[in-house]
Image (cartoon, grey):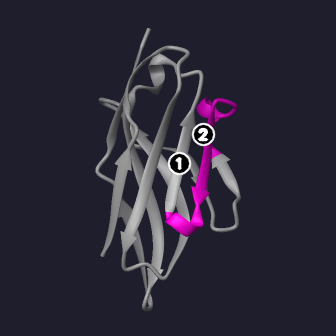
Amino acid sequence: QVQLVESGGGLVQAGGSLRLSCAASGRIFSINAMGWYRQAPGKQRELVAAITSGGKRNYADSVKGRFTISRDNAENTVYLQMNSLKPEDTAVYYCNVKTYYSGTYYNSWGQGTQVTVSS
């Protein structure tokens, strides 16, 4: 119903930056919250950052002051700017989008993009 295409992951040295993008398409009447989660090997998936349709943001304590989430409503795209990256940021990052279409709410996930931070 809803397709998410992620891009922007990769390998970076500690202290470096990466920008993740996630574009949503398909049966979308409105987009509510958009966010990024991550999952490191052997750990549970955790929320990194989220942004509501009204622009309210929340961040995991571990990324506050280093990561910034933003969205382009016209393009149905959410971004995650990651600065001052640390090795503990290494994980697969997943985009999550909550949408509404024809009386139904959808909770969609991207395919995941690997972020590796070397020390």
Q: Which residue is mark 1?
A: 79
Pick the quarter of the image with the N terminus.
bottom left
Q: Nearer the viewer, residue 8 or 104?
A: 8
Q: Report if the CB atoms under discs 2 and 1 are less than 8 Å apart.
A: no
Based on the displayed image, in which of its 4 quarters is residue 39 positioned? top left
Q: Secondary structure at mark 2?
A: loop
- In the image, what residue occupies the spot 43% across and 53% down? 22
Where 50 falls versus 40 (above or below)?
below
Tell me residue 91's x, y (percent).
37, 31
- As drawn, 118 above or below 83: above
Residue 45 figure quarter: top left
For label 2, count other residues whose C-alpha is less than 10 Å away and answer few (under 14), some (14-19) or many (20+).
few
Is 72 magenta? The answer is: yes
Q: Amino acid at mark 2?
A: Ala
Distance (Cα) linking label 2 and label 1: 16 Å
Residue for badge 2: 60
Residue 68 percent location from the top left of the image = 63, 41
Which label's residue is closer to the chain start, 2 or 1?
2
Residue located at (60% from left, 30% from top): 62
Q: Is 48 positioned to the left or the right of 70 in the image?
A: left
Q: Which residues are magenta?
A: 59-76
In the image, residue 14 lies in the stretch drawn in magenta: no
